[in-house]
């Protein structure tokens, strides 16, 4: 679906269709907002992003037929991305897989193949079927490949990264916290299988606070209109979408924004900066969603006046108003902080960029910065200024993911004893 068709679909619910279509088109063409997937709609996939849906299911069938005997015996499938695009990798991934299977036929229990980027969808299909998949990545591969690699590994723990010849996590959060790392925190918890709309927001394009508020307002308006216009594949999903209006906002290019502000990952300054940015964005989202709820009503068939009258005898006026205020958000948000959000565009050391996977050390800092916002105001009111500063320094030191090393222990000692 083209940008014009998408904006026309979203602007159809507005009174001034032309003006809002122009605003939505500016968001999409300016790169502020992108829609990676909308249920029931056909969107052109990005170059090299792979295949999905029926094609992915077909790949899994083909893999099981080709490798059926080995998979039944418990073999581990290894997808080798280090030689991506090299002379040993044929153009077609099926031929490539067969070639490397034949080459390693004398190594029972382990199968390897060199594959193009599209094969990552097959890796996700294999892992979804409960079969562990080891994926080897080379720093010489493209940043686009690394982003897909990181996202797939965090989405399913059965996709296991192989770095420097060993299976190792992409960051300290891999494993037990994998589910939270993919979408760490939400204003409201969302069960699996419920309907929600994903929007990618480029942090670099938000600009100064006044412009950022306005752009986030347009993003939420765009999402609210699109939820109504989407042809949801199931009736239950459509009812869930219309009632709860869930929106997952994935903020990308955080690392590039840090670099623009001359900040380094894993430092106290970057942690404090992240905390301020996340707090500002959260407040904007909640504020704009409340405004939209006042204009359009909080949810379909929900009358706030009747609820207020029903709750007042039990809770009193003040508590009833507080309960309604907390529930009258138009949207149920997922504030998504994925590993792909942390990767800068320039990740090639030869071009002056940092090693891509080093930036994943920033993910714990983002997790802590986001988590502390929930209890931060209460903590700040109970702690002295020096203790509050010490807490922030300790959190930043732990979030740097270097506690087990000598550098991490030294950072902790400095944080404990250092001045505010």
Image (cartoon, rainbow, N blue to C red):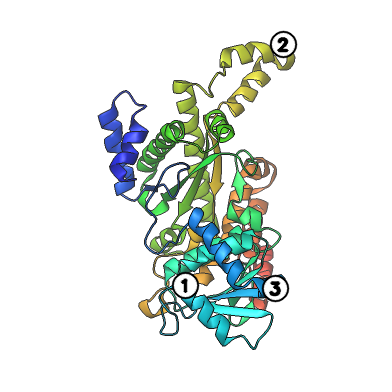
The residue where tag 2 is placed is 313
Residue 93 numbered tag: 1
User: Label 3's element?
Assistant: loop
Q: Is residue 189 above or below residue 121?
A: above
The answer to whether residue 165 shows anywhere in this view is: yes
What residue is drawn where x is 38% and y is 36%? 218
- The first of marks 1 and 3 along the sequence is 1
Which numbered mark, 1 or 2, is in the foreground of this view? Answer: 1
Q: Quadrant of residue 141?
A: bottom left
The tally of labels here is: 3
Residue 404 numbered tag: 3
Cβ atoms under marks 1 and 3 closer than 8 Å: no
- Using residue 238 as the reference point, say whether residue 313 is left or right of it: right
- Using residue 99 as the reference point, say whether residue 157 is left or right of it: right
* Quarter of the figure with the N terminus: top left
- The first of marks 3 and 2 along the sequence is 2
Pick the front one: 46 or 260: 46
The answer to whether residue 362 shows anywhere in this view is: no
Spatial separation of the CA atoms under disc 1 and disc 3? 41 Å
Pick the front one: 193 or 199: 193
Q: Position of residue 45 (x, y in %)?
A: 39, 55
User: Label 1's element?
Assistant: helix
What residue is drawn where x is 69% and y is 46%? 383
Which numbered mark, 1 or 3, is in the foreground of this view? Answer: 1
User: Label 2's element?
Assistant: helix
For label 3, the crowd category at 10 Å Cα-Cα, with few meaning under 14, some 14 to 19 and many 20 or more, is: few
Q: Position of residue 26 (x, y in %)?
A: 29, 43
């Amino acid at each position: 679906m083209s940008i014009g068709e998408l904006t026309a679909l979203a602007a159809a619910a507005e009174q001034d269709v032309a003006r809002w279509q122009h605003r939505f088109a500016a968001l999409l063409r300016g790169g502020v907002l992108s829609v990676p997937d909308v249920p029931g709609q056909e969107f052109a996939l990005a170059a090299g992003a792979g295949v999905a849906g029926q094609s992915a299911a077909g790949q899994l069938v083909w893999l099981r037929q080709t490798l059926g005997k080995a998979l039944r015996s418990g073999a581990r499938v290894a997808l080798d991305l280090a030689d991506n695009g090299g002379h040993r990798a044929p153009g077609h991934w099926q031929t490539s897989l067969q070639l490397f299977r034949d080459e390693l036929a004398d190594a029972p229990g382990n199968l390897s193949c060199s594959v193009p980027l599209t094969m990552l969808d097959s890796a996700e299909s294999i892992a979804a079927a409960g079969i562990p998949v080891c994926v080897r990545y080379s720093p010489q591969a493209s940043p686009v490949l690394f982003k897909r690699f990181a996202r797939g590994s965090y989405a399913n723990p059965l996709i296991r990264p192989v770095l420097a010849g060993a299976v190792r996590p992409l960051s300290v959060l891999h494993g037990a916290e994998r589910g939270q790392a993919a979408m760490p925190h939400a204003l409201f918890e969302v069960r699996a299988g419920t309907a929600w709309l994903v929007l990618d927001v480029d942090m670099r394009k938000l600009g100064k606070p006044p412009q950022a508020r306005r752009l986030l307002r347009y993003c939420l308006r765009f999402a609210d209109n699109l939820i109504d216009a989407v042809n949801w594949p199931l009736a239950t999903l459509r009812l869930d979408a219309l009632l709860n209006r869930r929106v997952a906002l994935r903020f990308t290019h955080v690392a590039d924004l840090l670099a623009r502000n001359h900040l380094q990952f894993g430092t106290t300054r970057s942690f404090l900066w992240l905390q301020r940015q996340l707090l500002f964005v959260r407040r904007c989202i909640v504020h704009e969603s409340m405004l939209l709820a006042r204009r359009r009503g909080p949810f379909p068939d929900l009358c706030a006046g009747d609820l207020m009258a029903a709750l007042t005898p039990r809770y009193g006026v003040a508590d009833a108003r507080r309960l309604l205020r907390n529930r009258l958000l138009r949207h149920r948000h997922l504030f998504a902080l994925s590993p792909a959000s942390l990767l800068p565009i320039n990740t090639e050391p030869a071009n002056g960029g940092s090693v891509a996977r080093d930036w994943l050390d920033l993910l714990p800092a983002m997790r802590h910065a986001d988590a502390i916002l929930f209890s931060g105001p209460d903590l700040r009111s109970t702690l002295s200024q020096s203790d509050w500063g010490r807490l922030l320094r300790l959190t930043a030191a732990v979030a740097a993911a270097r506690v087990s090393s000598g550098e991490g222990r030294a950072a902790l000692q400095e944080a404990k004893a250092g001045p505010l």
